Image (cartoon, rainbow, N blue to C red):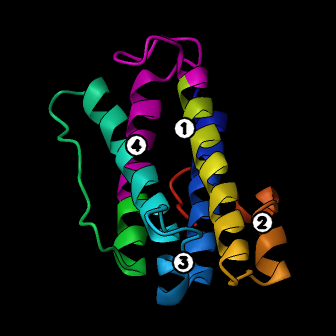
Amino acid sequence: MSEPILRQWMTNNNINRFLLEAMTPETLEASVAKGGRSAGQILRHMVEVRSQWLAAIDSSHAAEKLPKQVDIPMLIRAFDASAAAIAGVITRVGDPHAKVKGFGEDLTAFVMYLVSHDAHHRGQILLTLRLAGHRLDAKVAYGLWDWRARTPRSVDATR
């Protein structure tokens, strides 16, 4: 049964939303070095990687490319849409031990890969913001680790 995996996948997305909702247009543009990725570009990359995996799994899904300049509402919509699409994969595959076509490993490994990718980049964003002089409020930074507060009550919920 995939319900526990689905719940944790949606929790991961809620954590991404929590971070996005704490950001401002100024923090989206924050970058550590000339030519380095801004926080917004890192977030854009996170969504595009999800989309690329969805396209690899299901050829009817076209890999989404977001515009170079992104804003917070656009990113929230893109994260929610990609999270819902991956939730659909989790539901369709169902068995945590079943292979995910296009990924080559089982459903649990696929979801853990995506969660690890998101978590890596959330840390990268926090470091970028700190080094660029835009340190997030401690309540937000620690709130990213409050998994229980971000877990949906039901698997149909995204918040």
Badge nearest the viewer, 3 or 1: 3
State the extent of the magenta-drawn residues as a range.
81-109
Closer to the camera, 65 or 128? 128
**Dot 1 and dot 4 residues touching (CB under 8 Å):** yes
Mark 3 or 1, nearer chain start: 3
What is the x, y in percent for residue 103?
Answer: 42, 18
Give the CA distance from mark 2 to mark 1. Answer: 20 Å
* On screen, residue 39 above or below 42: below
Which dot marks residue 78? none
Label 4 residue SS: helix
- Mark 3, other Cα within 10 Å: few <14 / some 14–19 / many ≥20: many
What is the x, y in percent for residue 150?
Answer: 70, 63
Farthest front residue in view: 34
Badge nearest the viewer, 2 or 4: 4
Residue annotated with mark 1:
114
Residue annotated with mark 4:
50
